[in-house]
Image (cartoon, coloured by chain):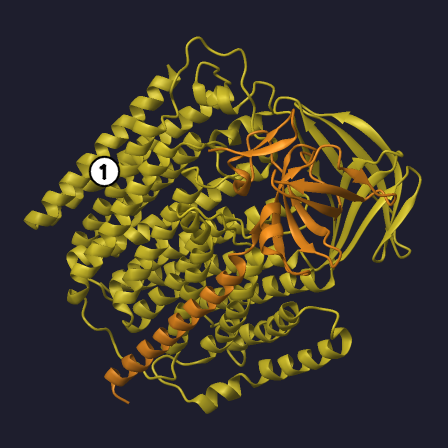
Chain colours: A orange, B yellow
Amino acid sequence: MKAKHQRLILALAALVALVGAALLAASALRDEAAYFYAPADVRTKGVEAGKAIRLGGMVVKGSLKHAPDGVTIHFDVTDGKATVPASFKGIAPDLFREGSGVVAEGAFDRSGTFVATNLLAKHDERYMPRELEGMNYNETTHQMKAEQ
Amino acid sequence: MIAEAGLIALWLAFALALLQLTLVGFGLAGGKQELLGSVRPIAVAQGGLIVIAFALLIALFLRSDMSVLLVVNNSHSMKPWLYKFAGTWGNHEGSMLLWVTVMGVAGAAVALFERALRRDTHMATLGGQAAISLGFYAFLLFASNPFARIDPPAADGQGLNPLLQDPGLAFHPPTLYLGYVGLSVAFSFAIGALLTRRVDAAFARAMRPWVLGAWILLTLGITAGSYWAYYELGWGGWWFWDPVENASLMPWLAATALLHSVTVLATRDALRAWTVMLAVIAFSMSMVGTFLVRSGILTSVHAFAVDPERGTFILVLLGFYIGGALALFGWRVGAVREGAPFELVSRETMLVVNNLLLTVILGLVLIGTLYPLMTEAFGHKVSVGAPYFDRIAGPIALILMLVMAAGPLTRWRRDRLSVVARRLLVPAVIAIFAVALLAWVAWGRIGVLPFFGLVVALAVGAGSIAPLWKRNLRRTPLFTYGMVIAHLGCAVSLAGMACDSAFTVEKLAAVRVGDSVQAGDWTLQFNRISPIAGDNWTALQADLEAVRGGGAPVMLHPQSRFFASAATTTTEAALLTRWNGQLYVVLGQEAEDGRWQLRIWWKPFVTLIWLGGILIALGGALALIGRERRGWQLKWRERAAA
């Protein structure tokens, strides 16, 4: 086989690989583009049960309840426009508190409760999950407001 | 005085880099190769000065000089000395100074130790190194001065982020940076070769040790970072597809591809333009990573400051260097002659496939990392997480591993498919056997990806040793052992990842003092909980007694630490390592009825993940030593003959 043909075949293989990868990324991203939800998005768009998403918002004051098993908690997540019930089994991060921001990874169950498998709270006082930037929780009215 | 001296050293290094660049410009334009004689000492002096500046900053941290703004913001006089020392780079300015220090030291090393390169390309390379350094010196001097004073001095500092207060901080960032920024040498080599139009096998042989060196350190840095995140964050995970982790993975993927293509160029004089392109891409990925981490557009434990001005500065530098290098490549690539041809069934083709797959993974990771930033610019908040990366990178990585097993069993230039297939017989039989065994034992209980991960790990493990089959082991060159060990390391690491996700047993419980809890084969007795105090923290510590089967009990002490200076709590997991896995215990919060939360994992063979990483780096080191030794031997023989 001639060297020219070799190069052609290699170039074609590279092209096929790149186009394939681009298609793969596009299809995966279309699914993932809907990865992060605020409670209002959940209400308007709807999320099917069992689909892995991230739910972000503030933990509603007075909503945090501990289950008798000692390791499960129930709480409500709000963005000021809508509120979603959520549960988490595990050790909550230290900075997970009522009235504080949270990003929960998990999926909705059939009853509409968000079952979190992982909670991302603020690492320290200076850290804010990126998705929650621009959201402010009003301590006195317990309302969310979006920063303009 | 120390801070002023540091700033002066930084300015002098900046001036020397400017001088270095100017001299190289004259030398290249006028064809005066003898100027290399003056460029070299300048590069060495520049490296020395920046090391002095960095040492002075360390001194400021060790002395807790509270008249220096950076020390005030990031240190505390009560910290243990190790964290005062390592805390020097646990902040934005300090880590950027470490960045340019590595850059300067790499430049000095190229000036001192490089002997194989043509004089004009050598000089152009030092010019490239100076050009990149200049931009980052300017960034430090004009936008991130680490030596700025405050008046009046503060009473004490604000302390270091408690998550960073760990021995890992002393090892992970410097090693990572040595690899990350060490890739700048490959970049400068590529610029140099493009400027002098000399891209050939001799150039590749000169560049290879630098690429290998950077790649080894990058591998170690990533491995260390992964283990650190694993035990410090207390989530039991070892990779989170955090943008900052991706920022270190992307240069590694490019450097791995470069490492293989530079070998093709050195051995067979093929893939000339592609190798130069990869050298440019590898360091460009390092700079993109630095931009992502240091610009403040991401928030994570790695991102220290949110300052849009700095982000813009780095973005401009990034556009300038990457754009400049690509423009130079486009302009000069026509002058790079076509390399040697090869047949379709040959090791060259295998390595081209390796490069192709690595580049595809790199592209997919890059897209996934940048996509949220791009959509945010258009007003959408999107996050791309582990599901995306697992789904796309996982399967391609498995295919890549299979090619990795076949590549070393294929001859250079031309081979026959039937012969290669015969050499792959043993690994293939092992793979079929593994599929059958796993399907029988664990079908339906483990996921598809871990299932094939285990199969591929076994097959590739066997395949990676196959090149040693029927060879005289004493006469096999050291770099062949290096390759075998590095490839085996990939299989070992993959086995660890697959075992962790397939067989981990997790137990979550709320227990009273005196109770015991069962996790897998282990029984843990909760003896007591007590307060203890460290240098700048207090903690609640649980005393647990772990027993497996009839074995001797082992004490475990997970903690929940509170740092008053930052008003932060961290979990300190307790780890118990056995040959066949790790027991991982995290102490949670106290429930209202006095029970304590415990999260326990038994992770079979999880340590193989990092053992594999160390093997990969070790393989690289053996290859480096083997190649260098052969170079010296040849030189001595020549001398003896003359």
Q: Position of residue B580 (x, y in %)?
A: 74, 60
Q: As drawn, is B487 to the left or to the right of B195? A: right
Q: As drawn, is B126 to the left or to the right of B70? A: left
Q: Secondary structure at mark 1?
A: helix
Q: Amino acid at mark 1?
A: Pro
- Vertical order, B563 against A66 (above or below): above
Farthest left residue?
B30
Q: Say few, some or many: other residues with alpha carbon within 10 Å of mark 1 (under 14 / 14 to 19 / 20 or more).
A: some
- On what subunit does the disc labeled 1 rest? B
Q: As drawn, is B325 to the left or to the right of B171? A: left
The answer to whether residue B351 shows anywhere in this view is no
> Dot 1 corresponds to which residue?
B41
Q: Position of residue B567 (x, y in %)?
A: 64, 25
Q: Quadrant of the N terminus of chain B?
A: top left
The answer to whether residue B60 shows anywhere in this view is yes
- Vertical order, B145 against B593 (above or below): above
Q: As drawn, is B63 to the left or to the right of A3? A: right
Q: Position of residue A63 (x, y in %)?
A: 75, 37
Q: Quadrant of residue B301?
A: top right
User: Residue at the spot x=15%, y=65% of the render?
Assistant: B335
